[in-house]
Image: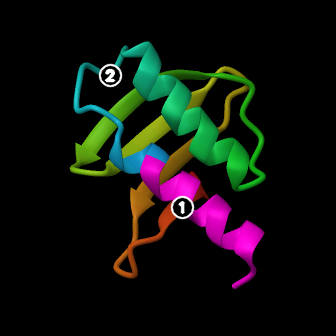
Amino acid sequence: MSVPAMGRAFILTMAFFVVPVLAADDPALNRDLMAVISLQGLPCSQVVSVKQQAANDYIASCKDGNRYHVFVNSAGRVIAQKQ
């Protein structure tokens, strides 16, 4: 893994783990999830709602209608999958 890729992976991981476990309408949580989605190259104009499935496991709905499952996989990587 190149240094820039390692840096991006670190930023993604840190952004995801520092997300506070607060109410689903928390603007900081919405911004953090949007950053994770955007950094993975997926379209999302703005995260408008979040449903927490479990610790570090969210369903994020975007203003443009896209929905993403954002979670940490077994290898410790932050993943955003289109729903």
Magenta includes 7?
A: yes
Colouring rule applied to residues: rainbow
In the image, 24: left or right of 59?
Answer: left
In the image, 17: left or right of 68?
Answer: left
Magenta includes 29?
A: no
Given residues 47 and 28, the one toward you in this image is 28
Which mark sits nearer the N-terminus, 2 or 1?
A: 1
Mark 2 neighbour class, 10 Å CA radius: few under 14, some 14 to 19, many 20 or more: some
Look at mark 1 in the image and give the residue it sits on.
Answer: 10
Amino acid type, label 2: Ala
Q: Residue 82: x and y, percent? A: 62, 53
Given residues 23 and 19, the one toward you in this image is 19
Look at mark 2 in the image and give the residue it sits on.
Answer: 24
Magenta span main SS: helix
Mark 1 neighbour class, 10 Å CA radius: few under 14, some 14 to 19, many 20 or more: some
Q: Secondary structure at mark 2?
A: loop
Residue 26: quarter of image: top left
Q: Secondary structure at mark 1?
A: helix
In the image, 44: left or right of 24?
Answer: right
| Residue that appears at 60% across and 34% down | 34
Quadrant holding the N terminus: bottom right
| Residue that appears at 37% across and 44% down | 58
Residue 45: quarter of image: top right
Look at the image and give the residue range highlighted in magenta: 1-14
Q: Residue 41: x and y, percent? A: 78, 52
| Residue that appears at 70% across and 49% down | 39
Amino acid type, label 1: Phe
| Residue that appears at 21% across and 50% down | 55
